Image (cartoon, helix red, strand yellow):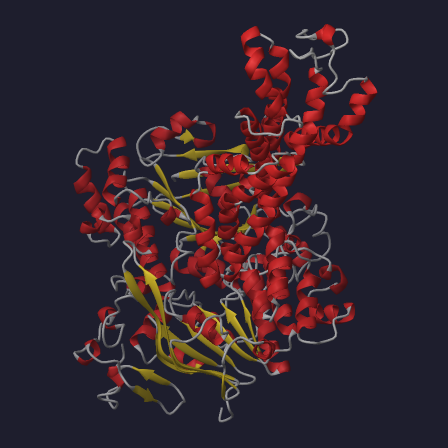
Amino acid sequence: MKVRVGIGIIAFFAVVAVVGPWLNDLMGIGPWKIDYDAISRPPGGGHLLGATSQGTDVLAQVIAGTRNSMVVGALAGVIGIVLAVVVGVTAGFFGGRIDALLSFLTNMFLVLPVLPLTLIVAGYVQDTGPVTIALIIGLFGWAPGARTLRAQTLSLRGRDFVMAMRMLGETRTRLIFVEVLPHLAGWISAMFLHLVLGAVLAEAGLAFLGISSADTVSWGTIIDQARQVALLNGMWWWFVPPGLCIALLGTATGLVNFGIDEVMNPRLRTADIKAMRKALA
Amino acid sequence: MSDIPILAAEDVTKHFESRDGVGRHVTVRAVENVTLRLHRGRIAALVGESGSGKTTLARLLAQFYPVTSGRILLRGEPVTGPDRRFAGEVQLVFQDPFASLNSLRRVEHNLRRALKLHAHPAGDEHVRELLGKVNLTPEAEFARKLPHELSGGQRQRVAIARALAVRPSVLLGDEPISMLDVSIRLDVLNLLARLRDEEGLALLYITHDIASARYLSDDVFVMYAGQMVEGGPAESVIQEPKHPYTRLLVDSSPDPERAAGSSAFTAAEKLGEPPSLVDPPPGCRFHPRCPFARDECRTEFPPRTEFPDGGWTNCWLHVTRPEDTPTP
Amino acid sequence: MILDVKGLDVDYVSAKGAVRAVNDVSFQLRRGEILGVAGESGCGKSTLIMAIMRLLRPPAALTGGEVWLHPRDGEPVDLAARTDRELRTLRWRRIAVVLQSAMDALNPVARLSAQFADVLKAHGYRDAGKRTAELLEMVGISPDRARSYPHEMSGGMRQRAMIALALACDPELVVMDEPTTAVDVVMQRQILSQILQLRDRLGFSVVFVTHDLSLLVELADRIAVMYAGRIVEIGEAAGIYADPKHPYTKGLRDSFPPLRAPVTKLSGIPGTPPALRDLPPGCAFEPRCARRFGDCAERRPELLPVGGGLAACHLHDRERAHV
């Protein structure tokens, strides 16, 4: 149940990200369309979620922002997880010098202060569109995942069933991809979601600090703009919707992770209390 | 017994480098100068307490890790590493059938991979033939099952079938029945005996269960704290142990035939525990627990004494005064 | 008599429905007696003693029966009907338990002495140090080991320490679940020998659960054999071994190769134990039984007197009819 709600929320955002521009057209709104009559208007009438101090529609901005936020999240997630799997699994499976080298690399990235570094890099790079931001976040965010995957692989590698297949003369490639990797699927998907959420938050954080491209709109940029004006004027309708979106996405990844945890660790499965009571009655 | 052993460990030693609780570098002397030869159509049992080095020896024979010194010989030739050819001759069956099968893969995956890797035909009928060999019928049904749908005994038979798929000449069993239910243990033992008789496999049966070693094996070898202390024909080793440690093992084993209510339980009462392998006692490692220990036991490992029935032991009691056979 | 178990039922409850793991189990334990409970995994032997000790955790639940404890002094108590609070006063003082994994139950970061002191002080012992030394001595551990941490001791020593801890408050009944399964044969023999000696000295009673029937024959006074949640035979240990009345007991006995007697080909018991969710209406052992006949598959045999003990098998119906 928890998992379904979580997946539902994530799917909802994904759909909005894909069909967002359409949706805006359909409703006849746009993130840059300025309605001078509606400047700073609270929700209602032509603007379901109200309008900003420049007269743009908050709903349209949030919808358009969903696409960019999700692109940053998904792209950073993919980059991060691929790096984590490649580095972590390779280090754990091969051990020895390869492990020493990759672990050193992982530990280095692990102790790097990611946010300040991201800030610096983002500051240097001229184009700070969503793809660039996603690249930066993905490249700096894989290390914790790699570490966990290395430990998991290390323990799997020594398990009897891997030893038995190795004893048969099984090739390394197949040992990794057929015997070991499928057991990490739960970890990998949990990590991926974690990375996605982390990236969305980081992007929002960067935008909040003013690092974003002026011509893109994301949940972070909306909050950033609102921060400058809305808080002073009590225009809650401006920053609550994007904030809520971020919170919802966080909740959803959390819910899905609980579910993955339960599948991977049967001890967490809650006993069916109702059935139990009935039997005892 | 005069033929060349199929697989042999000649004077092998294995030391593991490790760290102790406070991070100091230590050497664990797991196996020390051990010789063990496995012959076609014979089952050798390797008995001893946990920590005696029996599993390490099996894993050295299986080339899981290299020896520190000594040699592993396959058909008389030194083995250099675990290559495909070696895998085609030597297979190991693990203790825990719940861990030795990939929980996400069907039975047929295991068998088919084993067949394919060794260039044997790997059609459905060959998979079924293997399952038939280990009495898993109906074969087609078992081929499609996942490990969690099988009982422990069935899983162990799948593991044995997988090992057999490469058509090995040696099977190493590391306590293959100790995690199985009592009523099906004999099934697996009888299966191993049949493989010896019908396929001429050389088998190593590692166990701490003396009675099952006697039931299954032709020869019994006894290890204590990394050293081989006695070996010979099963019946002679178990009925007339020469080494005091073998006697202790046999006397400690459950034996319902023992006069009911007798005081057999007091026999082993305050004999202490096996020594640390990091800092083992010098000489015969059993001497701190041995009621017959003498001065030479504390300084030098005893040479081998051979007996007319083919048995032998490394014990000073049999070296100095062979005519005065002690009855420990 | 110290323990009188009457018609005990334990269910494992899940969304799919209840599965009866222990089914109508009754037995009595005499004072100072060692009762062995033998059976294979899933037969309900461990669940049974967890139920007796009231240590069941969901999804397992005690759903019927009584467990009467008859203390040396005082009124009999039905353990099955007591609340956790009431049980607390009985545990350690009257009843104690040693589990298979007991050796792992010691707190790894506390010295043995501290863990003994916890238990002893909670039950009003003033001089915990002296009592700890006494207890360790009893199980053959040198009292100066009390200062050790669990990781400094071998598995066998930890297991003996747990037995000593169980005996801390001089209980009248000690329940043991495979206490020697994880230790070596030599250590196993030492532990069993100590249990026997301590029983003779202190007079407690023991329920000893194991899958190893060959071991029970030497240890126990009486043996109960369980199959698919029920006791199928119970009687004097020597009798159970020499002349088992139930084909399952016989099969179990013949599953252990002999240590001395001539080796003959043994075959164990064909097939596997039935799924508890899907038990046959008659005798649960019928599908694996070499001596099944007539309506074994339809009519469930009751646990009735045969020879000196009780057995649940139709083979003895005729015998009984003649008596």
Viewer-closest of B199 and B269: B199
Q: Position of residue B136 (x, y in %)?
A: 69, 65
Residue B18: which quarter of the image?
A: bottom left
Viewer-closest of C153 and A277: C153
- Is C230 displayed left or right of C240 in the figure? right
Which residue is rendered at x = 59% and y = 56% of the image?
Answer: A180
Which residue is rendered at x = 67% and y = 36% of the image?
Answer: C16
Q: Position of residue A44 (x, y in %)?
A: 73, 7
Q: Position of residue B170 (x, y in %)?
A: 56, 79
Residue B288 at least partly seen: yes
Which residue is rendered at x = 74% and y = 28% of the image?
Answer: A16
- Is C317 displayed left or right of A112 in the figure? right
Extreme-bottom residue of the structure: B2
- Is A32 displayed left or right of C140 in the figure? right
Quarter of the rendering occupied by the C terminus of chain B:
bottom left
Q: Position of residue C24 (x, y in %)?
A: 57, 39
Relative to C108, residue C18 above or below: above
